[in-house]
Image (cartoon, helix red, strand yellow):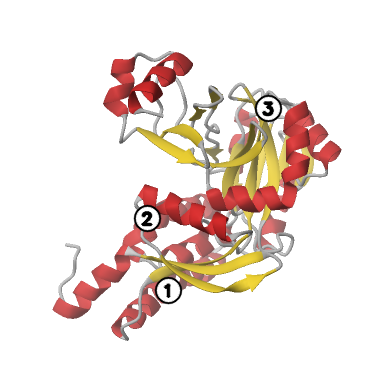
Amino acid sequence: MSIDNIMKRLTEILGITRDVLEKKVGRTIRIMSYRGIDYVVLREDVGGYREGTIVLLNDEKIIHGYPGIRRLALLEGVPLHMVDEIIVEEKMNGYNVRVVLAGNKVLAITRGGYICPYTTARIEKMYGDRLREALSEYEDVVLAGEVIGTENPYVVYEYPEARGFDYFVFDVMKNGALAPLSLRDEIVDKYGLKRVPVLARLNKNELEKLREIVDDLDRRGREGIVIKDPMHRVPPLKYTTIYINIKDIEEGMKYPFDEGRSYLFSRIIRLVCQAYEYGLSDEELDHIALRLGRAVLRPAVESLKKRSMGRLIAATYKLVFPSEEDLRDYLEFLEELGVDVVVKIIGTSREGVKAELMKLKDTHGYYSKILETGYSPLD
């Protein structure tokens, strides 16, 4: 499809003037394709449409971006925000994926608005027939869920219930809005899909029970909770555990010039608020401070030692592609996005093609310069 035709159709579908759209092509608006499906990604809010919105040009279909969830600093904020009854769900540590049907194809769309070939192939293999049936019957809905497990190229975190890769539905969207949770439960139960764990149904003022839930998740090394109104009359809230806030810093500081800086401050503020709200003693603060200090320094020092021995500072992902075609699609997708990777084929099995992908980090270059010159890249 020519650029001229794409712009013409996009103008008609979104109801935004061509002049406005053309100024944003390339940066805010990205034109992509996947197996004959032409689509447009909105990388920022445009004309009333959320960041992450995707337009399927062949079907003239708009898949609205998933709405942002406000982060709670203090659990005491729950009664101020929620209406009455609340649903407490586990916040799983993975990546947000919307699943839709285009023609007869199941598509997996990332939070940013891209059709991910790898995620699409894995979800198709696991749940394709069930998803086709569900989305054919409920044709006006979009499923939103979390992909978790160690076999993905985005957020690698081990869950016993994920078997390497799995998809857990947490919401249903209709016309860009979050639908009542009863509809999600109806679809999930009817078609044998998985949903995120529902931990409790409480009154918004039952803060002690809420803290008990968070404490239990913290002890078990889980990420946190999402607090929802059953009818989605108000936006959801999210709250993470002390464990995951420190764990995230530890992971981010493997690559201090990449994720390290952005990971540090926000998570330290979360820990400050948790220490205040929980009334932690000096002894308890010392314990957390030791864990925090180790999380900041140890992985960063280990990476520097690694580079000094001539090794690469890179993120490594072990993936399983259902077919060689799926592997090619994913590599073409990364090339289109300008992402450089090194691919090593490990072997094949009944599950598909096993491959290891390595993405070089900016930290590699910064550490190389530090070791070569002795100078700091930061003032």
**For residue 129, what is the image quadrant?**
top right
Residue type for callout 1? Pro
> Which secondary structure lies at badge 3?
strand
In the rendered view, does 30 fall on the left or right side of 206?
A: left
Q: Return the residue at label 3.
A: 141
Q: Which residue is pictured at 34% across the width and 51% down the height? A: 338
Of 228 and 38, which appears nearest the observer? 38
Question: Up-down: is 162 above or below 37?
Answer: below
The quarter of the image holding the C terminus is bottom left
Of 242 and 146, which appears nearest the observer? 146
Q: Earlier in the sequence, mark 1 or mark 3?
A: 3
Q: CA distance from mark 1 to mark 3?
A: 43 Å
The quarter of the image holding the N terminus is top left
Residue type for callout 2? Val
Question: Up-down: is 289 above or below 203?
Answer: below
Q: CA distance from mark 3 to mark 2?
A: 32 Å
Q: Return the residue at label 2.
A: 339
Q: Which residue is pictured at 17% across the width and 79% down the height? A: 372
Q: Position of residue 103 (x, y in %)?
A: 64, 31
Q: Position of residue 337 (x, y in %)?
A: 38, 48
Q: Position of residue 213 (x, y in %)?
A: 72, 51
**Can the viewer see residue 206?**
no
Q: Return the residue at label 1.
A: 299
Discs 1/2, front: 2
